[in-house]
Structure formats: structure tokens, C-alpha cells
Image (cartoon, helix red, strand yellow):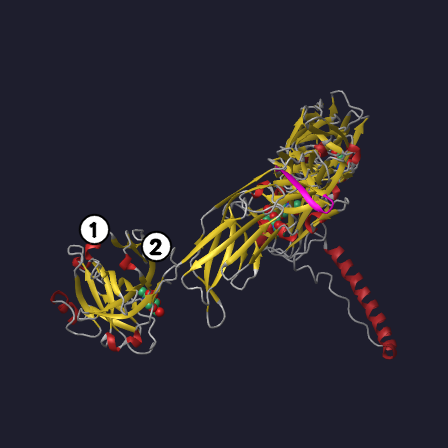
Amino acid sequence: SCNVSGFRDEASVKHFSFYINKPANPGLDINIISTNDRGFGFAIYQQRVRSGEIFITRVSPNSVIFEIQSLQRGDEGDYDCSHDFPCLFLLCDLVIDDSLSVSSPASTSLSFNEGEALTLTCQASSNTIQHTHLSFAWYLQRDGEDDARPVISLDRDFTLRPGRGFEARYQAGLVRLDKLGEATYRLKVSQLELSDQGKIHCQAQEWIQDPDRSWYPIATKDVKPDSLSLAVRILAQHTALQEGQELLLSCSIDTSNLEGSFFSVAFLREGVELARIGPTGVLSVGPEYSGRENQGELRAARTGSRDYRLILRPVRTEDQGEYKCRVWPEERGLDGVFTRGASQDSSSQLVSISATDSGLSVKMQDAASVAEGDRLRLACEVEGVKGRLTVAWQYKSSSTPAALFTNVIGLSQEGVIEETEEFRSRGARATRPAANVFVFELDEVKLSDSGVYQCAVSEWNTNSKVHSQSQAAAVTVTPLDTKVVLISRNNKASVGDDVDIMCRIRGPHIPVTVTWSLQRDAATLDNILTVYADGAVSWSFSQHHYQLKVEKQNQQVIHYLQIVGASQREAGKYQCSVSVFLHNVHKKLSQSNQVAVVVENPESELALSSPPVLKTNVNMDISIACSIISKVSVSSLYAVTWELQQDGTNKTIARSDRHAAVTFGPQFEENQRQRISMIRTKGRGFELTVRQVTSTDGGIYVCKVEEWLQDPRGDWYLLTTVSRASKLTVIEPEPNLLLVKQEGELNVSLSQNFMIPCHIARQSSNESRFQVTWFWQKQAESERPIFTVHRNSTFQQSLRFDLRFDHPLPNQFSVTVLKPNPEKSGTYFCEVEEWLPSPSGWRRAAVDRSGELIVRVSHAEAVSGCNSAVWIAVVVIILILLIAVVVLLMVKICRGKMSGGKKAGQSLWAEQHALKPSGGD
Ligand SMILES: *[C@@H]1O[C@H](CO)[C@@H](O)[C@H](O)[C@H]1NC(C)=O
Ligand SMILES: *[C@@H]1O[C@H](CO)[C@@H](O)[C@H](O)[C@H]1NC(C)=O
Ligand SMILES: *[C@@H]1O[C@H](CO)[C@@H](O)[C@H](O)[C@H]1NC(C)=O
Ligand SMILES: *[C@@H]1O[C@H](CO)[C@@H](O)[C@H](O)[C@H]1NC(C)=O
């Protein structure tokens, strides 16, 4: 993209051209494309421009984008974009901002002797965005001539040309123009000639090139250095003085043009300004001398149109040296504001000042080093005093070496303290403990108090100062440097032991605050206690477990921390840290290393014994003993947990804690719990009793015994856990199943029910459960199950039979075949499976069969071998009964006419067509 800016007319469309400068041909711009001219591009680009491969897109009146859509190898190079002016430059200065600036620093002395050298500089620069060139020239307007003529010039094509009349001196190297840096043009005339007298100025011109390649100037600037010449002279009334006498310096100005001129005049000693008199006569005194002006020791004034005067009285020995005065011409503008011209110095005037024979001498240490926060004390000893003394304590910062002494605090003749606000609030003190000793004290020094402190002692005679003497001391405030080391001799302790930790602090000579902390784990850091600078102790933890001792030694202070009767709670990483309370804030200074204190529990000797193998029969009670065979500690408490391992899974049976409170494991159901009891045998052992053992009670019984001890704080802690296992085998009962084996034969008539009993004579266990199946075998056919009662009391009928199941007693089962037909004839029997519980579930222990019952069902109705006489008797009795019943009914009906009828009774067999167990479990 290519943008232009700086046009007054932002909205008008600007034109752009793009060039390439190929590496093979540096310096040769090859035209590519222009917004203004279709034929702009060189032949090698015209085809690509016409085909639209290279084009310019306008973004705004001031911005375009140049694009090549398909780059070729030859497109490598430096691309340039230029803004095309739509008009001739001379006519379109409207679009070019005036950015040429030319300036000339006030020149040095402009009054020269013939043969002297002249050097003048001018600054000229332009900041247009257009590509412009500058031309530059120095001109001289000779006295008496109207026109200025060029001395030497630098053309816009960077060629140097001497002016007419200066060619020979240029060739001889006596006239030079040098361009220094970007914008400085220096004229040097090595040997001035009388004809050079006049006004010299510099001129810069800015040029721009038209597309037709011709150059046009777009701006011209002149700067005329002031041709005023001035000379300054200094004069001392006396150049050799004695301490206390008066130094009088006069300064006079010589100038060709005094009329209406203004000056600033300054007096300097060794380059340091004492006083300056402004163009309107206002005096200003240099900061180092303001004190003396205040005391009336320094005065300066303009004494005539060209004369200035400085008086110092009394002079001090330190006032001797080279004095100069410096003059600046001041030009008053129409607005009354002065513009200062180049300064002109006088020559130097040496003034020497000898000390009088005053015996006053001041002594102080040269240097002092004091730790931050400590007290600074400086003593200044005075000797040879004749009059009365005052002292001023002064301070000069060391961070700014050029800074001046400022008063800190002073003692007047009457002993009154004069102090500055800043040091008053800091509690600075000036005292005079003896007639000849002055002391300065400052508490809690800061790092920034480093610097030079001076005691300036003045001797007074009546009301005038006779002598002054001062001594300076360099004071270094050293940062608080503390070294804190934590040591422990026995950092591995047993519960109950005492542990000593020592915090050794080498460092500031000021009282410090020491904080002890304990880090028990990565997350928690607790303060144990703080020992304040004033000796007060504040405890964050229980005080009973620690003792503290502080021992001050020569170079160090040792804080001892004793852990009294260590417990696990005191284990962890200890650290001490040091802070100070300085200038009303707590300042952390240093932290010690960490010392880890490990508290070890005592060794436990707990050992157990329990029978490794146990066997029992079902239904028996079994006790598993687990005894402590080691020495029993009287201070220990024991907890026991009984566990049962079966088929790889662990179940907690019950736990008796160290206070003998019993809890059952969650997997143990209430009915099982009633069979279990735990006892302790006189502190020595533990016994688990399981009553009426079932075959599911087999497994590995583990007793886990925990030993608990009390630490010095009274907290119980687990010392150790020891386990012992006993394997219990439950001896299964021998299979012992026997069914009643009665064989039988039964002739039944059609529809006469018959029962097939299944009675168990003997069973293996009274936990047994039975599965009973009745079979039927028809003549030569194979036996077939009819009906099964499962262990879970569900029934399964396998053949179409009308049956009734009965289970009157735990060992008695039967089915009754209802309304049989001759088809149901055959052999019937039952088979019983006996199931017993085992640790892994139920198992089939035995199988037995009953005797066989052969049943024949005849076609005849229920008639059989009774004799006919019996039958006749029976019929007669029935008839008599029937008549009796009829008679009774008739009597009832006659009565029933008044009382209503009676319902007939239900059939006894009404429910027996369906299978209904009438007994069982
Ligand atoms: C020109 O101006 C556009 C839009 O203001 C800007 O995105 C682009 O970066 C500029 N290009 C240059 C070379 O400054
Ligand atoms: C049953 O009937 C058969 C012949 O049908 C006979 O041989 C048998 O003795 C009878 N049994 C009884 C107990 O009456
Ligand atoms: C189980 O049978 C035994 C005799 O073998 C008897 O002493 C015991 O009481 C019976 N237990 C139950 C629960 O019926
Ligand atoms: C009862 O036991 C039998 C045989 O073991 C089984 O087929 C049947 O699903 C069981 N019924 C129930 C309700 O558990």
C-alpha cells in the first residue's frame, strides 16, 4: 500500500506511480504503473499491466494498493511508490507544507582580530514526506554594502561552491563548509581578513523535483546571527585578602552598541555561579551562596550603565579561587519578553585568601558507617575558641554528588536549636555535651540518609562572625543485613523426648522481632510464638509444649526453642524469621533455613498367638482365642477386630475398640450376631465365640490387634497393628438319608382317590432341605416324574394328573391322585434329594427312594367284595334315615312358612379339583 498525507486538501484524488529497482541494476528506477498515465510503464511491464496482472486499487483519495497477481522471478527488487503532483510546483505550493526549518545557535565571540578563526553553525532540516533536497549557503554582507554575497554554498546536488571572491581561500582550505550529521552546517574561516567584517547569515532552500525531472525551490529560510560585538572585563579591588576581609569584584561591558541594550551579568567562582544580575537589575544568588546572602555576607548590584559589582564580606578561605564574570546580551521584544543572546565571558581573576591567625579548628571523624535503623552519632570537637560558637549541622546526599549542603539542625549562640521540619519529625538532636564538643544524633537512620554530614562551627565576636570552620564526614548507611541460621542437635526424637532448636541471629544491632513457625505438612504453616523487640512474647500454640530462652552474645543473639515432651503434633519443619519495626512499619529481614524435627513412636513388641487350625462339627460352639504373648505394656490399650475371609472376600465380624466398645461389621445380620460373642481375657487375649456352628461358618478367622499409646499431651495414637489368622473347618455331617420303604398294592375303583406317601425316616442334619419328586411307571414303560416339590417350596407338575399335595410334618410329604381312571394304573414311588448348606452355598448330600406302590384302577364303580345281606341292611338303614329326614324336613317347611328357608351346605370337594397344598412349610 502507498499513502500520502499532509495535504491541505485531503479529499482531492492523488496520483501514484510505482517503480522497481532491481538488484541487477541498482540505482535504476524502472517504471511499472501509474494511476495518472497509461503509458507510464516500461515495455517489459506494459504487457502485464494491460493484461490486468499488475494493477493499482484505490482505497481512498490518499491511499492506493499496488498488486502483482502472479509473481515472476524478475519481480525481485526494491519497490518505490511516488506521489505524482498534478500541477507545476511553483503553482501548487498549496499542496506542499512548509516544513523547512533553519536555526542558528547564538554564536560565540563575534569580535575578532585579523587572522583569528571564525566558526559558525546553522541547523537546517526539512520534514516533508516528499522527496526533497536542501541547498545551503553562508552569506556575508560586508559593512557598507547593501547586498549579501555567498561565502560558500552546498548545492541541492550536494556540490560545494565557494562564493565569488572566496575561491582562492577555499582552494587553500581556509574557507570550509562542513555538514555535520543530519542537519548541521558549519562554516569555518581559518584566518579572518579585515574585509570579512560585516554581517554573516545562513540560508537554506528546499527543492523538489517535477516529473519532468527539473528541480524547483519550494522554501527558503535565512538566519542572521547577531553581529553585535561585546567585550567583558573583570577587576578585583584586592586579589590577596585575609580571612574576614572584603572581596570586591567589578565587571564592565564594552560594546559597540550600548544604546537600548540589556544584559544579564553573572559572577562565577571556579565555574560556580555566585550571583546574577538580570536585564532589569534583579539579583539572583546561586544556591550555594544563598545562605551567605541571607546573612548579609554577599551583595551584588549594577553600579552603572556598563558596570556591575559583587561584594563578599567577610571572606572565607574557601572563597579563594578564579573569578569570572559572564555577560549575556538580552534583546527585548515588542511584548517586553527578553531573548537571551550568546554569552561572553571575561578573563579570569585569581583571588587568594589567607587564613587569619584564628586558632579555631574543628575535628570530626571522616567517615562513619551505620546500619539501617541504627542511630547515627557524629561528634565535632572544637579547639582554639575565643568567642562564642554556633554550630550548623549540614547534610548533602551522596546519591546526587552535585547537590549542596542543606542545614539539618543547628545550635545558636544562645543554645537554641534550629532545625528543619524534616529532621524535627525524625527526632534529630544537636547537643553540646561539653563546651568544645558538638554532637549530632539521628535515630533509625534510613538508607537514604547516606551522604556527607558537615559540622560548620562559627565563632562570633559581639554580633559579627569572626571565623567559620567546618568538617565533613561521609556517612554510609548499610542495609540491614541479617543472617539467621537454625540448628538442632537432635532432630530425631522419640515421643516424650525434649528437642532443642537454636535460632542464631547475626545482624542488625537493633532489637528484632523473632517469629517461630512450624510447618506440619505442605499446606499448613503455623506460627508458634513471636518474641518482640521489647522482649514480650506472644504464643499462638499452647505454651506448655515449648520453652524459650534468649541469649545475647557479642556478635549474635541466640533464641533457643525447646520442645518439651515431643509428640507427633510437634513434628514438622521449624523455621525462625526475623523482622524489625522501623519507621513505623514491620520489615521482614531474614528467614532461617528449615529444620525438620521427626518424632518417632516407641517400638512396639506386640506379638500374638492363635491356633492356626480349628475343626468343629456342625451345631457345636467354637471359641477362637487370640492371645498377646509379648509383654503387655500397662500404659497401652488394645483394640481388636475380627475378620472372616471366605472365598477371597473379607468380612468384618466385629470390633472391640481400645475402650472395649463392641461394634459388629455391617455385613453381619442381626440373627447371625446373636450367635457371636467376643470377650477379653484379663488383658492378655481376645476370644471370639461362634455358637451352633453351621457349615457356612468355615473360613479363615483373623484377629487384628491394635496397640494404642498416649503421648505426653494425652492424645492416644496407634502404635502398631498385628494380625493372626486361624483356619476353621466345619466338619460336614455324614449323609444319612433314609425313606420309609413300604411296598404296597392298591386296587381302587374308578374315581376312588388314592395317596402316594413319601415319609423320611432319617435325615443327615436338621438343616437339611428336601426336593421331593413322585414318579409313575406304567407297565413296561419307563418311569416318569409326575410332580416335584423344590427346596424353595415351589411345585412343578410334569404330567396331566389331578393331584393334591400334603406336607403335614417336616419329614412327611404325600400326593393324592384324585378321580383316577384305569389309565392311571401303574407303579408309583417318590424320590427325595437331601440338600445341606455349605460355605459356598447349598449342596446335594444324599438321594433315596421310597417303596413302590402298585395301583390298579378298575372300570367298576366303587363296589367290591361285601356280601348282599350287608348291602340290604345298609339300604334299609338308609331308607329309614331318608324317611326320617323327609319327615323332619316337612315339619321344618311347615314352620319355615313363618321363618324362611335355609340354604343348602357346600360340597366338601368343591375346591379339590385344583392343586392345593394343605400342609408344608
Ligand atoms: C495506508 O493506509 C491504510 C488505511 O489507512 C493502511 O491500512 C495502510 O497500512 C497504510 N499503508 C502504509 C504503507 O502506511
Ligand atoms: C387286586 O386285584 C387282582 C386281580 O384283579 C388280584 O389278583 C389281587 O389279589 C387283588 N389285590 C387285593 C389286595 O385285593
Ligand atoms: C437338631 O438336632 C439335634 C439332634 O440331632 C437336636 O439336639 C437339636 O435341638 C436340633 N436343632 C434344631 C434347631 O432343631
Ligand atoms: C425354585 O427352584 C427351582 C429348582 O431349583 C427353580 O427352577 C425355580 O426357579 C425356583 N423358584 C423360585 C421362585 O426361586
The residue closer to the viewer here, 537 or 184, is 184
The x and y percentages for residue 734 are 66, 30
The x and y percentages for residue 686 are 76, 28
Is the residue marked by circle 1 packed among few (<14), some (14-19), or many (20+) residues within 10 Å? few
Tally of numbered tags: 2
The residue closer to the viewer here, 826 or 66, is 66
Residue position marked by numbered label 1 in the rendering? 172
Q: Which is nearer the N-term, disc 2 or disc 1?
A: 2
Q: Quadrant of residue 51?
A: bottom left
The residue closer to the viewer here, 376 or 871, is 376
What amino acid is labelled 2 in the image? Phe
- 352 above or below 862? above
- 674 above or below 67? above
Q: Quadrant of residue 126?
A: bottom left
Q: Is residue 261 magenta?
A: no
Q: Name the element at disc 2.
A: loop
Point out the stretch of residues depicted in magenta: 461-474
- 769 above or below 26? above
Instruction: Mark yes or no: residue 140 visible.
Output: yes
Q: Name the element at disc 1.
A: loop
Q: Quadrant of residue 55?
A: bottom left
Residue position marked by numbered label 2 in the rendering? 112
Compared across the picture, whether 148 is left or right of 652 comes to left
Q: Quadrant of the N terminus?
A: bottom left
Compared across the picture, whether 572 is left or right of 95 comes to right
What amino acid is labelled 1 in the image? Ala
Residue found at x 48% / y 72%: 335
